[in-house]
């Protein structure tokens, strides 16, 4: 358990410290039915999440969100991150596990959860009984989440928990380190920046520990921020991209929307295809899914009242590059121009308004995917830079009634 | 620790008042207290470690109680947290009707209480940035078909509507953080409408002060804080918060009916591509200029639901207006809630 007084300021690699068991015990544990993964509700995705080794063994095991590990999922607003979590919760409940749901932002709408749980079941258990397996906590601030995870109480997580969902964990870090307050000296600004990084690492290592000790799956949902790319439009990245954070995430998924593929607009399922989403698989069980810098694995689905619904594409879907969310090389803090002592280096890049006065700050950091996307002949839809920034010159479109 | 009372509004700071100024001065946040060794905090803030440990213990206990896992509370069987205004099943899920059954259905019952919903578009019933149009509101009250069927005793009247003006960001902050909670409690309000959220950002956060933070960083931080505050108000008082937002034109290539060949649009995670879906405009063939709600992705991340008022030119001067549920935390419909 995390010590009451917390640990030192330096990011710890303590998520490698596990209770020791023998190798044969470990093997038995991993083959046990009780460690079966939590289904995502999308059979194709479940199979992919088994990981390359399991798949090659063509085992009969059902895949899904791996227990004992942390899965992160990010995507733009409204894409279905919560819906994904709800589906996983329903799967866990019907497999006999309890679910802990932590709201960092928007409260969970219980009627939705109820509907999906009911749809996934066979009617043998009462809704009340099923819903009682969901333990919901509101964690409105970072401090609340830290109190739960770093200063645990014996009753948390409840015994028999198979899945912990933290919805919109990235929002918690937004407000914990504000950058519009006077920071005093440059050292103070450095301290605050360092603290955010350290706390990210601390939280992640404890989440991993909680997953391992409790043999449960932890699912984190995260929002997106933008990264500027020279010559191309801005790219959506996970809001939390620090190394310490990503290192603890074993499986990373991205959700995004797209137009229906050719051939589906007029078919019987046209309605469903209009609500098309894709799950892009970036990393599975610690192994990046990039092949020559490209991510090739996506699963199409839509969201119904009854939950997630996998869609079968008429022909095999060719995946272009989903630009890798790799970090640009991190500049030492001192190199950030003095005119911006209060700006966290990464945050300047992640603002979605990409018209800058400080042109010099931006170009050096554009490493990564911009180059990748170029090689395959197109960034898809590009727009002109300046006129389309809506916030600098909004035309007030009000017509009086 | 200026964030302590924001995190725990009811925390009694009296026993620790000798510690807080030092902690504040050395930029120790509540999160730091929970992650750093008491000795390290004490060293930085020049305070006795034992006192710091006591404060930490008190904060942890208060947070546990707030969460509903404290010693005195015990773990509730059906998992509802002990926070006020939580969506417990006993209360039932509450929503405020929009007076339009189709839209209500698309939203899962209506504008949900406990959430922040945005309404955005080119034209809304109440004109933006002018004082609340009382004549117009009176008109709606008299003529709306749903309201007309109510017996007069139950009919809403103007007396239950409170209007406050916020001419600039500073007064907006003061009102949102101090006056609004008081007003909500005093009048048992169920709905708060903010019209519009973007208005005050245009003028104020524009110029760059030398040595200060970038104005866009300032704006982002302000938006995030405002979003968090509105969410906490909605949750604490179980009210519906509706935020009106303006739109601006967006210039982009039209998403032609699946000429994109087989497979996925190249560079699918580009902002320009994904925003076709989360702004409410641009995800299909439409006539007329696609729009983008103000305040960008940062604000879009703050809200639980977005309703777009779309206006299309049909040709021959015909105009079609409809409401679209772009996304909603409470319900997902396969089809847009066309009104």
Image: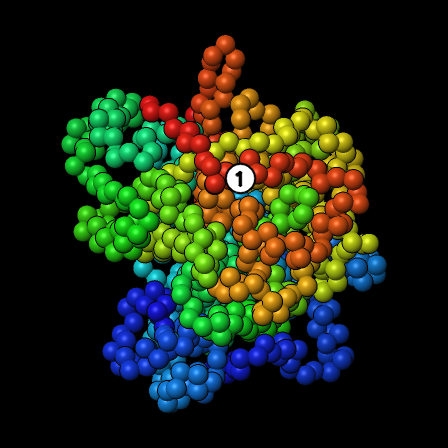
| Quarter where residue B27 is shown | bottom left
Expressed as whole percent of the image width and height from the top left, the position of residue A187 reads: 49, 75
Disc 1: which chain? Answer: A
Compared to B321, does A76 lie above or below? below
Q: Residue at x 55, y 49 (%)?
A: A356
Q: Quadrant of the N terminus of chain B?
A: bottom left
Residue named by callout 1: A389
Expressed as whole percent of the image width and height from the top left, the position of residue B290 reads: 54, 29
Q: Residue at x 21, y 50 (%)?
A: B183
Nearer the observer, A349 or B78: A349
Q: Is residue A55 left or right of residue B13?
A: right
Q: Residues within 10 Å of mark 1 (few under 14, many from 20)?
A: many
Nearer the observer, A384 or B317: A384
| Quarter where residue A304 is shown | top right
Q: Residue at x 73, y 69 (%)?
A: A31
Nearer the observer, B288 or A31: B288
Q: Is residue B169 left or right of residue A212?
A: left
- Residue A43 visible in the displayed image: no
- Judged from this view, the residue extending furthest toward the top is B316
Compared to B79, does B285 lie above or below? above
Report helix, strand or loop for mark 1: loop
Expressed as whole percent of the image width and height from the top left, the position of residue B250 reads: 54, 33
- Residue B278 visible in the displayed image: yes
Q: Residue at x 60, y 28 (%)?
A: B284
């Amino acid at each position: 358990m995390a010590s009451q007084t917390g640990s030192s300021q330096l990011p710890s690699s303590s998520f490698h410290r596990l209770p020791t068991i023998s190798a044969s015990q470990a093997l038995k544990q991993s083959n046990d039915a009780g460690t079966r993964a939590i289904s995502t509700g999308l059979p194709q995705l479940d199979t992919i999440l088994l990981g390359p080794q399991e798949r090659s063994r063509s085992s009969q095991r059902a895949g899904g969100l791996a227990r004992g590990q942390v899965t992160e999922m990010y995507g733009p607003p409204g894409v279905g991150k919560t819906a994904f979590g709800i589906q996983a919760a329903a799967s866990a409940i019907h497999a006999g596990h309890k679910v802990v749901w932590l709201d960092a932002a928007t409260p969970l709408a219980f009627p939705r959860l109820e509907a999906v749980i009911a749809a996934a079941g066979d009617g043998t258990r009462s809704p009340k009984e099923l819903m009682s397996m969901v333990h919901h906590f509101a964690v409105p601030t970072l401090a609340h989440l830290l109190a739960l995870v770093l200063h645990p109480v014996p009753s948390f997580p409840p015994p028999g928990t198979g899945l912990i969902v933290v919805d919109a964990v990235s929002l918690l870090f937004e407000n914990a380190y504000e950058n519009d307050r006077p920071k005093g000296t440059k050292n103070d600004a450095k301290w605050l920046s360092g603290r955010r990084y350290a706390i990210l690492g601390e939280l992640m290592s404890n989440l991993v520990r909680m997953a391992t000790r409790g043999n449960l799956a932890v699912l984190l949902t995260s929002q997106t921020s933008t990264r500027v790319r020279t010559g191309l439009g801005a790219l959506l990245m996970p809001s939390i991209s620090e190394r310490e954070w990503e290192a603890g995430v074993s499986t990373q998924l991205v959700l995004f929307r797209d137009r229906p593929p050719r051939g589906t607009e007029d078919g019987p399922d046209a309605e469903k295809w209009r609500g098309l989403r894709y799950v892009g698989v970036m990393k599975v069980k610690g192994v990046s899914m990039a092949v020559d810098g490209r991510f090739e694995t996506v699963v199409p689905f839509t969201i119904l009242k009854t939950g997630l619904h996998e869609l079968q594409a008429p022909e095999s879907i060719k995946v272009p590059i989903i630009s890798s969310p790799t970090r640009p090389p991190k500049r030492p803090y001192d190199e950030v121009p003095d005119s911006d002592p209060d700006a966290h280096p990464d945050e300047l890049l992640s603002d979605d308004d990409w018209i800058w006065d400080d042109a010099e700050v931006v170009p050096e950091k554009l490493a990564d995917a911009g180059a990748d996307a170029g090689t395959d002949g197109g960034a898809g839809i590009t727009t002109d830079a300046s006129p389309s920034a809506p916030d600098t010159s909004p035309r007030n479109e009000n017509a009086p009634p | 620790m200026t964030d302590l009372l924001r995190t725990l509004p009811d925390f009694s700071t009296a026993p620790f008042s000798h510690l807080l100024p030092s902690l504040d001065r050395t930029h120790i946040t509540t999160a730091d207290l929970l992650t750093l060794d008491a000795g390290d905090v004490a060293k930085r803030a020049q305070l006795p470690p034992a006192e710091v440990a006591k404060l930490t213990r008190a904060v942890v206990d208060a947070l546990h109680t707030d969460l509903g896992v404290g010693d005195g509370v015990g773990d509730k069987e059906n998992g509802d947290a002990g926070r006020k205004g939580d969506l417990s099943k006993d209360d039932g899920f509450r929503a405020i009707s929009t007076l339009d059954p189709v839209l209500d259905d698309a939203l899962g019952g209506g504008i949900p209480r406990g959430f922040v919903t945005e309404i955005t578009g080119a034209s809304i019933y109440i004109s933006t940035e002018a004082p609340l149009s009382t004549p117009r509101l009176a008109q709606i009250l008299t003529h709306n078909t749903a309201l007309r069927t109510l017996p007069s005793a139950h009919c809403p009247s103007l007396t239950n509507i409170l209007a406050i003006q916020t001419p600039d960001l500073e007064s907006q902050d003061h009102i949102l953080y101090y006056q609004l909670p008081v007003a909500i409690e005093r009048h048992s309000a169920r709905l708060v409408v903010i019209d519009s959220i973007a208005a005050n950002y245009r003028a104020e956060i524009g110029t760059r002060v030398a040595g200060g933070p970038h104005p866009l960083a300032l704006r982002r931080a302000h938006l995030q804080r405002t979003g968090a505050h509105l969410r906490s108000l909605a949750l604490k008082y179980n009210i519906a918060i509706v935020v009106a937002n303006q739109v601006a034109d967006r210039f982009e290539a039209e998403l032609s009916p699946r000429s994109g060949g087989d497979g996925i649009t190249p560079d699918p995670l580009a902002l320009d591509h994904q925003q076709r879906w989360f702004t409410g405009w641009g995800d299909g063939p439409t006539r007329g200029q696609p729009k983008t709600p103000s305040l960008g992705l940062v604000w879009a991340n703050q809200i639980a639901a977005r309703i777009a008022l779309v206006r299309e030119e049909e040709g021959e001067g015909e105009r079609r207006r409809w409401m679209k549920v772009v996304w909603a935390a409470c319900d997902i419909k396969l089809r847009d809630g066309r009104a």
